[in-house]
Image (cartoon, rainbow, N blue to C red):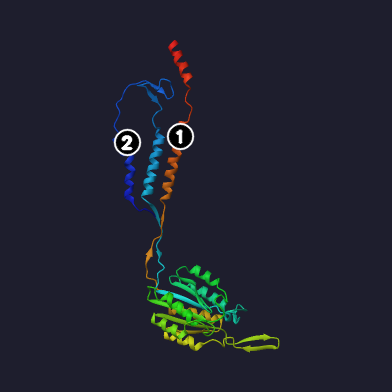
């Protein structure tokens, strides 16, 4: 839909008409008429034929002025209603990228993949379903860091998740520091619902703050913490002396993760396979539903530069045309003198 931001400005289009109407009317005097360039055309009382502004040039000037007035009225294109991406959720994803996440105990379509690859696949689907929520991403190993701040731009968040790699944050696991950083990023947000989802496959082995202390601070800030322990409980390991069955999740501290979730009003989940991990994030989607507040807005696109540009082009074209006309050669003086002499002899 097209509209004008300042429609009252259109009255300015009448200014040239009013100026022409107020212009005093010259008295009519009978005088000889000669074409421009004639040797008699410069004498007093002689009317020079073709000295006025052609009507088409006047119309071009008026059209340019009308377009300029239209540009000042600020034409706009108003789009269809779009629901604003506002929600009651600030959700921080906290993902372990320590070297243990390289364990290939997850299966996708019959082939083995490592834990981080499984997390990326499931999180991509989870992120895509959180439209309207503000999501962020914290990666941690020996130290945590913010890979993506809280944002509505979920496409960029997915890209930054895919760019994460195992070992980028060090070789240890600082669960307490990661939760502390998530709390720092969430506690100052204006929304009432603040959620963090922590995923790890091990125990706390580094950091300046203990997981229990970080959990206490998170609970005081009103942050609900969901914890996920990832890793299979049994897998076949092949070696030079044959195969043996091992538990690749022997270092996972389930007691700690359960305690952290309970103290903040969240839940602890165990993901032994890719399918279980998908189910866990589906459950979190149901526990933390998206809550849109129903506000709408109409996107507005300014179009004033089109009439303004056309007006400038018309004025420039007319200026160049008049300038080129003014450079036409005038008749030489000696020719005029010869003509005058012929008239005198006659």
CA distance separating discs 1 and 2? 24 Å
| Number of dots carrying numbers | 2
Q: Which residue appears farthest toward the front when viewing the image?
A: 208
Q: Is residue 264 visible?
A: no
Q: Give the residue displayed 31% in from the left and 45% down from the top.
A: 11
Q: Is residue 340 visible?
A: yes
In the image, residue 210 lies at what x, y percent? 47, 84
Residue 20 shows which numbered tag? Answer: 2
Give SS at disc 1: helix
In the image, residue 44 lies at what x, y percent? 35, 21
Residue 57 shows which numbered tag? Answer: none
> Quarter of the image containing the C terminus?
top left
Q: In front: 179, or 295?
A: 179
Task: Tell me which label, 1 or 2, sits earlier in the chain.
Answer: 2
Q: In front: 274, or 162?
A: 162
Q: Give the residue displayed 45% in from the left and 86% down from the top.
A: 212
Q: Is residue 93 left or right of residue 33?
A: right
Tag 1 residue? 323
Give SS at disc 2: helix
Which is closer to the viewer, label 1 or label 2? 1
Splitting the image into 4 quarters, where does residue 55 fall?
A: top left
> Quarter of the image containing the N terminus?
bottom left
Q: Is residue 306 placed above or below 193 in the rendered structure?
A: above
Q: Give the residue displayed 39% in from the left and 39% down from the top.
A: 61
Q: Is residue 191 placed above or below 37 in the rendered structure?
A: below
Q: Is residue 12 left or right of residue 213?
A: left
């Amino acid at each position: 839909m097209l509209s004008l931001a300042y429609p009252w400005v259109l009255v300015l289009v009448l200014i040239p008409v009013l100026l022409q109407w107020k212009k005093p009317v010259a008295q009519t005097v009978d005088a000889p008429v000669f074409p421009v360039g004639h040797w008699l055309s410069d004498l007093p009382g002689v009317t020079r034929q073709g000295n006025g502004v052609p009507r088409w040039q006047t119309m071009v000037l008026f059209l340019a002025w009308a377009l300029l007035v239209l540009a000042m009225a600020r034409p706009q294109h108003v789009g269809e209603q779009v629901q604003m991406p506002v929600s009651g959720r600030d959700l921080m994803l906290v993902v372990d990228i320590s070297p243990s996440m390289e364990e290939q105990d997850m299966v996708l379509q019959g082939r083995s993949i490592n834990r981080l690859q499984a997390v990326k696949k499931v999180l991509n689907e989870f992120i895509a379903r959180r439209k309207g929520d503000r999501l962020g991403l914290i990666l941690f190993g020996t130290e945590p860091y913010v890979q993506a701040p809280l944002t509505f731009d979920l496409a960029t968040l997915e890209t930054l998740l895919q760019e994460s790699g195992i070992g980028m944050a060090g070789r240890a696991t600082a669960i307490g520091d990661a939760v502390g950083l998530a709390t720092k990023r969430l506690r100052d947000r204006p929304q009432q619902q603040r959620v963090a989802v922590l995923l790890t496959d091990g125990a706390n082995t580094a950091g300046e703050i203990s997981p229990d202390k970080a959990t206490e601070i998170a609970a005081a800030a009103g942050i609900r913490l969901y914890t996920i322990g990832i890793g299979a409980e049994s897998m076949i390991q092949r070696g030079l002396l044959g195969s043996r069955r091992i538990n690749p999740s022997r270092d996972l501290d389930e007691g700690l993760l359960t305690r952290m979730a309970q103290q903040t009003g969240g839940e602890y989940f165990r993901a032994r396979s890719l399918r279980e991990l998908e189910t866990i994030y589906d459950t979190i989607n149901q526990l933390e539903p998206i809550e849109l507040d129903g506000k709408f807005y109409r996107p507005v696109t300014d179009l004033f530069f089109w009439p303004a540009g056309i007006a400038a082009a018309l004025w420039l074209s007319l200026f160049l045309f008049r300038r080129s006309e003014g450079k036409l050669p005038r008749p030489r003086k000696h020719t005029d003198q010869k003509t005058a002499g012929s008239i005198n002899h006659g």
